[in-house]
Amino acid sequence: MSALLEVEGLTKRFGGVTAVNTCSFAVPEGSVTALVGPNGSGKTTAFNLITGYARADAGVVRFAGATVSRPDPVRLSRTGLTRTFQQARIFADLTLVENMVAALQQPWRSAFRTAVRGHEKTRALELLDEFGLARLAQERAGNLSYGQKKLLEFAAVLMGEPRLVLLDEPTAGVNPVLVEQIEERIRELNARGLTFLVVEHNMNLVMRLCNPVVVLAQGTKLAEGHPDEVRNDSRVLDAYLGG
């Protein structure tokens, strides 16, 4: 299985603290790859470096075989790489449909227009239906529950039909029913060919959903492999799973 995303020697320092330290790993195309590790191990910083929300001090990112010399969120989204955030980023005063259209990375002058073109609305409603949100399509996004906001953000990043989605703690703070719904969506989308890189603290979910699993510790890769291999790795047990 070829790599859709490759990270080599990624490094980021904040003053005297090295948050990501010569980190290297790959995301096989068609996989649901997990990026796990204890708090402060560099997972979200790595996401930010890959997607252009922070600038790396060193290292190389390749997506679909091409080197991404200066990662930029909008350009990457247009080439098929997008992400969600720990705290869902939505426009509270827009309806769900308008949020979906805004996610297409349109110019700012048109992102907040009230008119939604027909094909955009059709695509938005199809995705909202898949995520169980169609009945709320014309509701203000700010009125959603915490879990529904995370579902909306997940649905919205699919508007551009990406090849790779980075999910940053998709089930954190979400009730068990929505956790099952999110897992089901990931499985179904992956079965259709979408690749995922997932930061997640719910290790039961990781072990049944993801392969391979990449473990970070102190900003660098500690282990990588099949969930069973990672679960039985003594270094991982010491660093993350608590022995």
Image (tube, helix red, strand yellow):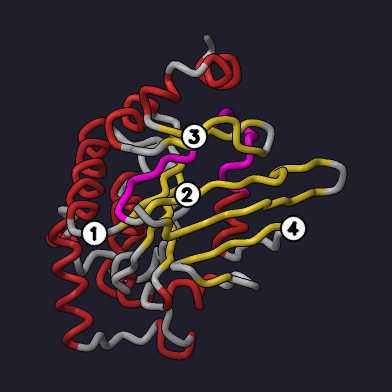
Secondary element at tag 4: strand
Q: Earlier in the sequence, mark 4 or mark 2?
A: 4
The numbered mark, 1 or 2, whose residue comes first in the sequence reads: 2
Q: Is residue 116 magenta?
A: no
Q: Nearer the viewer, residue 158 or 114?
A: 158
Give the amino acid at mark 2. Answer: Gln
Q: Amino acid at mark 3?
A: Glu
Question: Going from the N terminus, do you reach mark 1 or mark 4 first?
Answer: 4
Question: Which residue was labeled with disc 4?
Answer: 58
> In the displayed structure, does residue 114 sit left or right of residue 172?
left
Stretch in magenta: 30-45
Closer to viewer: mark 4 or mark 3: 3
- In this figure, which residue is indicated by the disc labeled 2? 87
- Which quarter of the figure has residue 94? bottom left
CA separation, marks 1 and 2? 26 Å
User: Which is nearer the N-term, disc 3 or disc 1?
Assistant: 1
User: Mark 2 vs mark 3: which is more N-terminal?
Assistant: 2
Q: Would you say the residues marked 1 and 4 are in contact, meaning their CB atoms lie under 8 Å apart?
A: no
Q: CA distance from mark 2 to mark 3?
A: 27 Å
Residue 58 left/right relative to 4 = right
Nearest the camera: 223 or 184? Answer: 223
Query: N-terminal of the two: label 4 or label 3?
Result: 4
Q: Secondary structure at mark 1?
A: loop
Image quadrant in which you'd find residue 99? bottom left
Mark 4 or mark 2, which is nearer to you?
Answer: 4
Pointer 3 residue: 224
Q: What distance separates the C-alpha of mark 3 from that of mark 1?
A: 22 Å
